Image (cartoon, coloured by chain):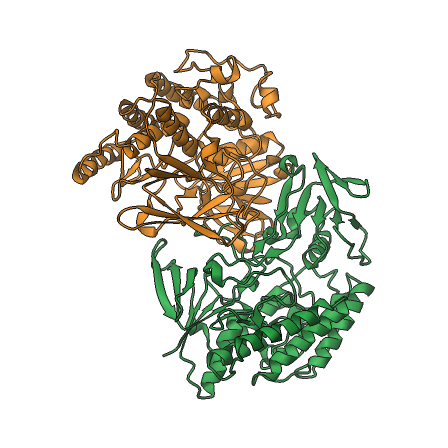
Chain colours: A green, B orange
Amino acid sequence: MSRTAVIGAGPCGLAQLHAFEQARLDGIDVGEVVCFEKQSDWGGLWNYTWRTGLDAHGDPVHGSMYRYLWSNGPKECLEFADYSFDEHFGGPIPSFPPREVLYDYIVGRAKKSNVRQFIRFDTAVRDVTYDGRSFAVTVESWETGPGVLRTEIFDHVIVATGHFSTPYVPEYPGFESFPGRILHSHDFRDAVEFAGKNLLILGSSYSAEDIALQSLKYGAESITIAYRTAPMGFGWPDGITEVPALQHLDGRTAHFADGSTREVDAIILCTGYQHHFPFIDPELRLQTTNNLYPPGLYKGVVWTANPKLLYLGMQDQYYTFNMFDAQAFVARDVVLGRLPLPEADAMAADVAGWLAKYAAVDSVMEQIDFQTDYVRELISLTDYAEFDIELVRAHFVTWEHDKDESITGYRDKSFTSPCTGTVGPVPSSTWWDELDDSLARFLKR
Amino acid sequence: MSRTAVIGAGPCGLAQLHAFEQARLDGIDVGEVVCFEKQSDWGGLWNYTWRTGLDAHGDPVHGSMYRYLWSNGPKECLEFADYSFDEHFGGPIPSFPPREVLYDYIVGRAKKSNVRQFIRFDTAVRDVTYDGRSFAVTVESWETGPGVLRTEIFDHVIVATGHFSTPYVPEYPGFESFPGRILHSHDFRDAVEFAGKNLLILGSSYSAEDIALQSLKYGAESITIAYRTAPMGFGWPDGITEVPALQHLDGRTAHFADGSTREVDAIILCTGYQHHFPFIDPELRLQTTNNLYPPGLYKGVVWTANPKLLYLGMQDQYYTFNMFDAQAFVARDVVLGRLPLPEADAMAADVAGWLAKYAAVDSVMEQIDFQTDYVRELISLTDYAEFDIELVRAHFVTWEHDKDESITGYRDKSFTSPCTGTVGPVPSSTWWDELDDSLARFLKR
């Protein structure tokens, strides 16, 4: 019997288990599927933990999730095509839910498809090697005890461990003697910790944008965001300012490229993440920066150097849960032989075509179009449910405009579901004024 | 030629390199000695870093050192017998130096014995296995690039990676929703971060004691220390209180076993460390709690199950640098065959004798006597320089009494060197009032 290992039970891993289960319900022999998850529960990044740094077993903490995180894109852009928000919540809900709501939704489908039985929790993968025929996957389980390694053989390995867990942490002159906290956004948990503080944030992507807003919302005195190449340029509320690159610190004083200075109490590095797979034989590791088309992956999923190894969700992301689904269905059909792979040179040519197309991408709008085209192709390859992807593309464009119009107000907008046509109701409180991010409160808004 | 790997270039690893170099200067063939250090510089824990959690390469940060740390024992109790404080500083200095001074001292001897040439910095050991004849040590170097593993063969491996790097991090009910920072002392860097805050500290050992005092000294509003079995019971200054075990948190409110409650802003877990060797084949890993005589180590150093594998500094510690020296000289002479090992059953009997003796230890004073006897035996086994160990024993007793007398004042006391007879001068400022922990300031006190 064919054996498939899935590493990680976050959105990608759960999508993969769901995909296999859908095939099994159709009477297809999917062989044995085993999912290894080092956390004690499912959900990956969406499984919030108060822990930072190292976990109870001395392993790096997977989570980068923080309190009061709300979706930064419309939920309609990430809706599962085969499990709508309407189905899960029994009726329409606003378009920008907080973490707990999205967690509930992801887990809801996993419960419905009954995939928990395939997951070995508290089990960290320590090594993956390939001997020319099959994979040896070595794991350490907290149930059998630390230091007890066990190796199992698999025909296929699907890596679904995410790429927002291992921080990229640069150093600037003066960090060594800065008299305050310096942390990476990976270790950011609760904006309340910074109430009354003057914060310096380094970065100009989603983390910087969102952590700046969160911190101001929960009481930070001021936030200075230093960018390296260009400011985000949103219409920031009073209290948030963007300045050119940090040069160095002198005690509490931050010096920037334009000669200006600020006194700051804490520094948050929103400097991004590394694709990091220390648990895989170096020869099998995906090596890429965070971008929309990592090299060496046919259809963005199949490791061309060895097509029995597959990677999910390794792209930078506009599309998320629905893209993971589309990838998982492709991965499943490759594993089951239902989606025949072309010869190596044809796969390489296909990848080269996408990379050439990506190289020509020149703007945010073109990035949205690029990933839309990619997801559209994925969906054409399998029996994953159809949804109105052109509407999702349009939503992303509207969403970008909404952000430019009001960075504190865009989360109050409504979008239409590409799956059900349901319109997200306008919430009764604005995101900026709503401090309670619980599911219970959200469903009453 | 015989090859020996030393893992780690902190106090233990540097002691080991120094020991080999002393033999080489005596005309002895020590073979090739290679020390692997994952940090970019030497000093181990004493090499302060602002980083917490994961380092620049996604590896766990080794350091647990924090700013404003002063020695919590008299420097005379840790003095190298063959490199006195007088020799290093050119004259007497007070008995309780801050971190930078001790770092300078450790590194000073390493420079004198010219051992830097043996250290491969930026090189993490990833795997150590034994095939019945020799060890295969697999390393990843940031110089050759991440993901490039290289394996070298060694006759002996000496593990000197310390055991205060991997935190033991328990969870209490309510941590999940506590609206403030929760950190382990491993991630504590700067007491100034907690100025004005009401802190809850969990623990009743050195970290709890020292971090409570530091935090108050640098402006914390209040510190509540919760103990599980017994309070430390020192005469705490106003602002520090000890209470029975934490039961749970309800929002910011901490509930203790005596029914009392406190509103707290941040929680510091001073809950200790794990001996953690994920880079060694599980069959070769020392497994022990933090105690004065880890099982399975002949003379506290030689891994009895395979005497070509040695561990330094794995004991809980009253004695530190001089004990590491005495161990390193024993390890060296075992490796060089100058200290013949008895048969396995005789080694086991020797270990059993120490464990039986340790089992009878019943008080702090008996612990001091126990470790004194252990170090005395080590010193009798090699040509490591003699020092007045009976004086050191007496110093520890005096020091414990000094702490009971004044927990804020004991660092102002003077002790006599067991190596040179020099008396540490009384500093011109008290530790409690001295906020500058630099070497430059210390040498002027």
Q: Quadrant of the N terminus of chain A?
A: bottom left
Front one among A405 and A3 = A3
Report which quarter residue B77 is drawn in. top left
Residue B279: % across, % down: 40, 49
In the rendered structure, the answer to whether residue A225 lies left or right of residue B229 reads right
Q: Is residue A84 visible?
A: no
Q: Is residue A318 visible?
A: yes
Residue B276: % across, % down: 40, 46
Q: Residue at 49%, 73% (x, y): give it.
A: A307
Front one among A234 and A67 = A234
Q: Residue at 58%, 80% (x, y): give it.
A: A83
Front one among A263 and B131 = B131
Residue B392 vertical placement versus B136 (above, below): above
Q: Residue at 50%, 79% (x, y): give it.
A: A334
Residue A209: % across, % down: 72, 57
Q: Quadrant of the C terminus of chain A?
A: bottom right
Residue A364: % across, % down: 75, 67
Q: How many numbered marks have been drawn onto this rendered protein structure?
A: 0
User: Residue placed farthest to the bottom in the image?
Assistant: A27
Residue A334 vertical placement versus A120 (above, below): below
Residue A273 vertical placement versus B361 (above, below): below
In the rendered structure, the answer to whether residue B186 lies left or right of residue B162 reads right
Report which quarter residue B390 is drawn in. top left
